[in-house]
Amino acid sequence: MLHDLPSVVTDELQRVHDELVQVNEGGLADYIPPLSEVDPTLFGLAICTPDGGFAAAGDHDVAFTLQSISKCFTLALALVDHGLEGVLDRVGVEPSGESYNAVSLEEGTGRPDNPMINAGAIVTCSLVEASSSAERFDRVLGMLSSCAGRELDVDENVFEQELATADRNRALAYFMRSAGSLTTDVDETLEVYLRQCAVLVTAGDLAVMAATLAGGGRNPLTNEQVFSSTVARHVLTIMATCGMYDASGQWLLRVGSPAKSGVSGGIITASPAQFGLGLYRPLLDDRGNSVRAVRACEQLAERFTWHALAQPDDRQLPAVLDEAAD
Ligand code: DON
């Protein structure tokens, strides 16, 4: 069960929400109608702590598709199935410095640069152990649902339209098959990847999913140990270096917590043992990251000093929570 976080946290989320209402920069993803026709005014934020404290503001219960945020959890599943070295044999962990759908593979090995870009995520999907692609997707959906603490569904319309416009991802998959880095069937693996992108979540779900990573793999809503704390650490590390694509350096500097964005406008960010944050705002910058959600994280990170490299004494969130509990 979740419980309310102290009002000081809710008030801060609300303050950031209200202050950022004037920020209207960015554009909607335009490659499929369900994304280009979404209400651009939506804005939701939610925070969840590993012990189940929860606070939210704005449109935190509006559903949207997970898109690239799914990549973190498929990576977790691949790590569960193959261990770190098994995954590293097939996909790298270096920031690519290129856009999320870049067609480039590591020289010599043919591996995609990292699991957060499309090429790497297609490979991690292929690494999920299963005897059929239906079973493979069931395991991915099971992982996503276990992290959200409820059964998630696929938006079949989004999936169909993703599939109909997947030429670049298909090209990437064929390119990787020719380089030997993808060994499963192209169509079947692409379907798993595009279906995971079309899973519906809310910002509230994202907060719980991020809190599962922050809590070392334990879901704060259900108490299920979904994966080990080692897997959580590995996923968070790769999110820290690669999760915001070619804006990952700026993000780490200004916000300082591992994060992952998606093209529908969602962002998750998590700080071990502290919190998971989920945000939704569909207007994106030219790197594919939600403008207002990034701005909200910058403001909250400054208010609560949660930067991973901050001195422990400078961290505000534990003190704020302790004080409110007294
Ligand atoms: O792979 C694709 O093209 C889409 N499903 C978008 C993935 C995504 O969210 C990329 N990131 N911002």
Image (cartoon, rainbow, N blue to C red):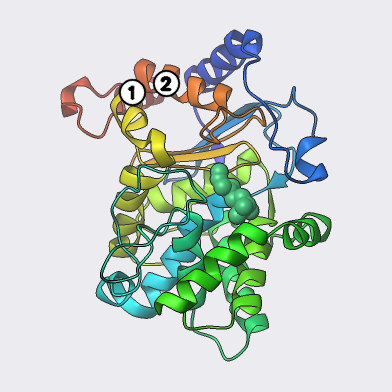
Q: Position of residue 11 (x, y in %)?
A: 54, 15
In the depicted structure, whether residue 2 falls above or below residue 8: below
Residue 298 is marked as: 2
- The Cα atoms of the two marked residues, 2 and 1, are separated by 6 Å
What crowding class fits label 2: few (fewer than 14 Cα within 10 Å), some (14-19), or many (20 or more)? some
Q: Give the amino acid type for the residue marked by disc 1 in the picture.
A: Arg
Q: Position of residue 237 (x, y in %)?
A: 29, 50
In the depicted structure, whether residue 81 falls above or below residue 154: below
Q: Give the amino acid type for the residue marked by disc 2 in the picture.
A: Glu
Query: Left or right: where does residue 184 sit relative to residue 65?
Result: left
Query: Left or right: where does residue 219 sit relative to residue 158?
Result: left
Q: Position of residue 102 (x, y in %)?
A: 48, 51
Q: Where is residue 88 in the image (x, y as percent from the top left)?
A: 29, 70
Task: Compare marks 2 and 1 and give the one earlier in the sequence.
Answer: 1
Is residue 35 visible to us here? yes
The residue that mark 1 highlights is 254
Query: Which residue is found at the position 31% from the left and 33% from the top?
Result: 249
Is residue 127 visible to us here? no
